[in-house]
Image (tube, grey):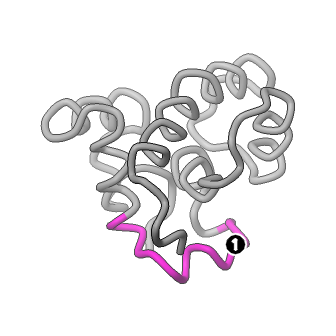
Amino acid sequence: MYKGYPVVGKKSAIRKYQSKLRPELSQRYGGSHLYTQAQVDIIIKELGLSERYIQYAYLMYCDINLINNARFQNESVESMNQTIAAAIGGGLIATSIDSIFFGGDSGDGGFGGGGE
C-alpha cells in the first residue's frame, strides 16, 4: 500500500476521520451507521481532510460490500481494523467504541459494515 509512510500520519488521519468526518456525515446525511463512498468523498474534500488514507474512512463509515476501491487488495480488512482500533484507543477501549459507534458484535470483524 503506502509502504514507507509513517504510521503516525495514518493514525492522525484516522483520528481526524473520527473527530471531523463522522459528525459532518451525521449532520449532513443523518445518523446512519453507514454512508456511501460518494458521501464520504464529498465531506473529506469539503473539510480538507487527507485523502492519503481514505480507504480507512471507507472502512469506518461505508458498507464494505459496496466499496469499489482497489486499495483494499493491498492490505487486509482485519489489519486495517487493527490500525483503526489502535488509532482511536486500542484494546478494550476500541471494542467499546466499536460497540457504541458501529453496532458492536456485527460479525464483520470490526469497523465498517458487511465484512470481508
Which of 49 and 91 lies nearest the eye of the viewer? 49
Q: Give the image location of residue 14, x and y in percent.
A: 49, 40
**Residue hosting label 1:** 69
Q: Is residue 77 left or right of residue 71?
A: left
| Residue 73 colored in magenta in the image | yes
Q: Residue at x 63, y 32 (%)?
A: 32
Mark 1 neighbour class, 10 Å CA radius: few under 14, some 14 to 19, many 20 or more: few
Total labels drawn: 1
Q: Is residue 114 left or right of residue 29?
A: left
Task: Point out the image quarter for the C terminus.
Answer: bottom left
Which of 114 and 46 lies nearest the eye of the viewer? 46
Specify the quadrant of the image occupied by residue 21: top right
| Residue 53 colored in magenta in the image | no
**Please, what secondary structure does the residue beneath circle 1 have?**
loop
Name of the residue lying farthest toward the bottom = 73
Q: Residue at x 58, y 34 (%)?
A: 17
Q: Give the image location of residue 5, x and y in percent.
A: 49, 60
Which of 50 and 6 lies nearest the eye of the viewer? 6
Question: What's under tag 1, amino acid-wise?
Answer: Asn
Question: Does 9 sit above or below residue 15?
Answer: below
Please provide the residue range marked out in magenta.
66-79
Q: Residue at x 31, y 30 (%)?
A: 97
Specify the quadrant of the image occupied by residue 48: top right
Q: Residue at x 43, y 38 (%)?
A: 102
Name of the residue lying farthest toward the left = 92
| Main secondary-structure element of the magenta-colored stretch | helix
Question: Does 111 sit above or below residue 26?
Answer: below
Which of 11 and 39 lies nearest the eye of the viewer? 11
Q: Give the image location of residue 75, x and y in percent.
A: 45, 75
